[in-house]
Image (spheres, coloured by chain):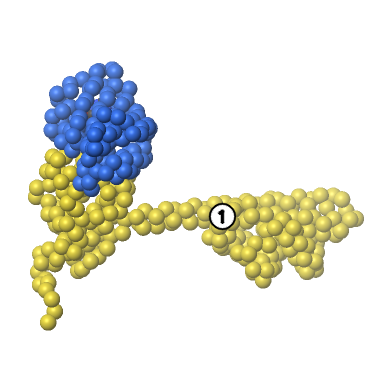
């Protein structure tokens, strides 16, 4: 797997969430993702970016357009140095929220993409990596 | 506030024409009257009227307080002036300098008039200065109020522009949502929709999300809340504009929209709404 291009985007405010979404849509289009896959990736990014702002206290989104043979994809890393997630199993349960949300952001995002990994330690921030292939 | 003496008032009356001429020259010099937004004729009329009002106000009695009755006509004039200047987009400095630039011509007049009496000159200079300052301050105050009103109105218009609630049919309202549904705007959108349902006594509200590019769990949460509120008011809600890619995404997110009527486009939603309201929809003839 090689990276054709990469970059980083701040994710600190609600406005950043909107801009990150727009950036991801551009990347998805340029990677040749179908409309439905574009929508899925953008929606997953929207969930993770908002978590970064709300629960992680702000962070960054690293993006990468990746190639493997003839297929192309978009890889996104959402990272923050917030409080971290004390119980990852609980956080990955449909409908569980520590705030006032629907509790479907993390689990929903996992179902919307091809690769999903969550790394977090209490007091050490959170890092979510996702990838969607064309 | 000290008063203008009768002698000063008479001097102003006698010298109206040269006073106006040099006031106009001053305004011209400061650039205040060279603006295309106000015609020369209008400017002349305003300077003439203001000078007349100063004379009337000062001579009909107590000039001690601007709040008194004698000055009500002057106050009304200045308020009108401020409002029109604010609407034309001038700043407060421009509006106040209209009045302050009368100081110099008046001072020159007083100097000539009281060349023989330094004490009276000092007193009258003070009186004129105080009067014009008070009138100028009044103008700035009302200008700011007018300006705030203009801004408040523009803000309201903006909010309404972004949330058009359209009456599609008797008893059927549509809310075409456009763009990013950030929480603040969604709140406004929802409130105006609920308000319009009450005002129009509508039975069905169609929330059209064709113009919303991303439906994530936050947007969905707002939609669910809105639908619940509509139902609590005894009306029905239909969500339209659920395109295939949005529908698939909603399923993967795990959102439960069961019990909520959704349609792919606004036309289908309207057809359903009309059917529910008891209208028969079909081709004519
Ligand atoms: N970046 C993060 N930092 C800390 N906690 C997080 C982060 N992302 C998610 N969480 C935790 O996981 C829970 C579930 O997240 P999510 O599935 O997006 O649901 P919701 O946002 O509706 O609460 C959150 O309520 C929060 O407690
Ligand atoms: Mg979330």
Q: Relative to A1, say whether B37 is above or below.
A: below
B142 and A13: which one is in front? Answer: A13
Extreme residue in the bottom direction: B285
Q: Identify the residue shown where x is 80% and y is 62%.
A: B7
Coordinates of residue B227 in the picture (x, y in percent) = 17, 50
B1 and B52: which one is in front? Answer: B52
Q: Tell me, what hue is chain B?
A: yellow
Q: Identify the residue shown where x is 31% and y is 50%.
A: B179
Q: Residue A94 falls in which quadrant of the image? A: top left
Is residue A12 something one can see in this rendering?
no
Answer with the quadrant where ligand 1 appears in the image: top left
Q: Identify the residue shown where x is 70% and y is 51%.
A: B130
Q: Identify the residue shown where x is 72% and y is 56%.
A: B30
Q: Residue B201 falls in which quadrant of the image? A: bottom left
Task: Determine whether, in the image, residue B11 is placed left or right of residue B192.
Answer: right
Q: Tell me the residue that label 1 is attached to.
A: B143
Extreme residue in the front direction: A69
A45 and B235: which one is in front? Answer: A45
Task: Determine whether, in the image, residue B42 is placed left or right of residue B275.
Answer: right
Q: Tell me, what hue is chain A?
A: blue
Q: Where's the N terminus of chain A, which quadrant?
A: top left
Extreme residue in the right direction: B116
């Amino acid at each position: 797997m090689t990276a054709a291009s990469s970059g980083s985007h701040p994710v600190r405010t609600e406005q950043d969430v909107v801009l990150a979404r727009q950036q991801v849509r551009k990347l998805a289009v340029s990677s040749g993702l179908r409309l439905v896959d574009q929508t899925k990736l953008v929606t997953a990014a929207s969930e993770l970016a908002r978590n970064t702002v709300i629960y992680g206290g702000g962070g960054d989104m690293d993006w990468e357009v990746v190639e493997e043979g003839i297929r192309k994809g978009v890889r996104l890393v959402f990272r923050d140095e917030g409080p971290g997630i004390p119980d990852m199993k609980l956080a990955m349960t449909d409908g569980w929220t520590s705030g006032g949300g629907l509790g479907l952001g993390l689990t929903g995002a996992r179902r919307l993409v091809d690769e999903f990994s969550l790394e977090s330690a209490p007091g050490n921030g959170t890092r979510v990596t996702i990838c969607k292939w064309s | 506030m000290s008063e203008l003496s009768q002698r000063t008032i008479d001097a102003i009356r006698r010298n109206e024409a040269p006073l106006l001429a040099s006031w106009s020259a001053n305004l011209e010099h400061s650039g205040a009257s060279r603006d295309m937004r106000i015609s020369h004729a209008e400017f002349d009329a305003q300077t003439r009227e203001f000078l007349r009002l100063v004379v009337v106000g000062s001579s009909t009695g107590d000039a001690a307080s601007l709040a008194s009755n004698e000055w009500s006509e002057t106050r009304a004039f200045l308020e009108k002036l401020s409002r029109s200047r604010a609407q034309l987009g001038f700043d407060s400095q421009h509006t106040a300098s209209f009045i302050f630039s009368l100081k110099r011509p008046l001072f020159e007049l007083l100097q000539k008039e009281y060349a023989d009496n330094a004490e009276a000159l000092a007193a009258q200079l003070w009186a004129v200065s105080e009067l014009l300052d008070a009138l100028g301050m009044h103008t700035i105050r009302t200008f700011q109020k007018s300006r705030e009103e203009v801004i408040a109105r523009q803000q309201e218009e903006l909010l309404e522009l972004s949330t058009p609630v359209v009456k599609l049919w008797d008893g059927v309202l549509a809310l075409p949502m456009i763009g990013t549904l950030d929480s603040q705007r969604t709140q406004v959108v929802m409130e105006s929709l609920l308000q319009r349902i009450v005002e129009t006594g509508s039975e069905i509200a169609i929330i059209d999300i064709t113009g919303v590019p991303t439906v994530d769990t936050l947007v969905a949460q707002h939609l669910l809340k809105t639908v619940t509120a509509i139902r609590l008011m005894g009306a029905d809600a239909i969500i339209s504009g659920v395109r295939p890619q949005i529908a698939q995404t909603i399923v993967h997110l795990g959102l439960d929209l069961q019990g909520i009527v959704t349609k792919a486009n606004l036309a289908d939603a309207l057809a359903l709404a009309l059917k529910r309201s008891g209208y028969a929809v079909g081709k004519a003839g």
